[in-house]
Amino acid sequence: MKKKLNHNLIIGYFLIALVMLMAVVGLFYTPYPVNEMNVLLKNQPPSFAHLFGTDQFGRDIFSRVMEGASTSFFIALCVVLVGAGIGTLTGAITAYFGGWLDAVLMRVNDVLAAFPSVLLAICFVAVIGPGTYNLIVALGIVFIPSFTRVVRSEVLVQKELDYVRNAKLMGAKNLRILVFHILPNIKPVLKTSLLVGFQNAVLSEAGMSYLGLGVTQPDPSLGRMLSEAQGFLWNAPWYALAPGLTILALTLGLGLVTSDKE
């Protein structure tokens, strides 16, 4: 029997690949220098010379979107690595060993989870200052509780199963059981959490940069470009459409792929 094509999955991967292509190419090549200004070309509509038009300083929007997409990918990837790395370690250890360590670490986790994530990230950035790497640290900390809860709940289930008991009877050490037996069995859930986390990291980075608390000038950022485009919605709507549609394409693609994984 012929297997039915999953159109949502195909569309999702296509949208992700499209934005990733722009981001990867933007690391090595852009049609114009991203910060090159030309007052004679300010607020020009899309054309063959400037595919997405130009902004209020005459900078090529397509070039800035390419580099902005690269920045968003880099920040989101680092945020997920920080959040998932520390969250997985914390969740696995607390669930497997329990006791006072579980009580202390989970109370700290509950305190972090009690605050709205964006508000907590704003507080961290207010203390350490804006910037790409400071934003990664702030969002990375904010993302730890969600990964901790997911991993902890899965490990609590897995450690009561027969294969863990058998491993203990055969003399396997706790660390070996945790790393080589339990964690591989929670990979499907962890993969979905990573996709959701990456999607949320992209939106969080865009939101923080939109508020002026993320990537600083003159580096391009999709969120900052949206913020700058607010004053030109009527006479240069393409300025907001280009970064906005890029964020939409990436988050929609990730959402379609994640929904299929679930």
Image: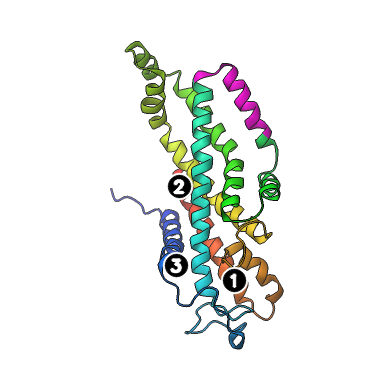
| Res. 248 image quadrant | bottom right
Q: Residue at x 35, y 52 (%)?
A: 4
**Residue 138 covered by magenta stretch:** no
The mark total stands at 3
Report the amino acid beneath label 2.
Asp
| Mark closer to the chain start, 1 or 3 | 3
Q: Which residue is mark 2?
A: 260
Above or below — where is 7 with respect to 195?
below
Q: From this viewpoint, which residue is outermost toward the top?
A: 169
Q: Tell me the chief SS of the magenta region.
A: helix
Report the amino acid beneath label 3.
Gly
User: Cα distance, mark 1 to mark 3?
Assistant: 19 Å
Q: Is residue 38 left or right of residue 155?
A: right
The span shown in magenta is 97-111
Secondary structure category for the residue under label 3: helix
Q: Residue at x 40, y 53 (%)?
A: 6
| Mark closer to the chain start, 3 or 2 | 3
Q: Nearer the viewer, mark 3 or mark 2?
A: 3
Q: Which residue is mark 1?
A: 241
Q: How is the image coloured?
A: rainbow
Secondary structure category for the residue under label 2: helix
Q: From this viewpoint, which residue is outermost toward the left?
A: 1
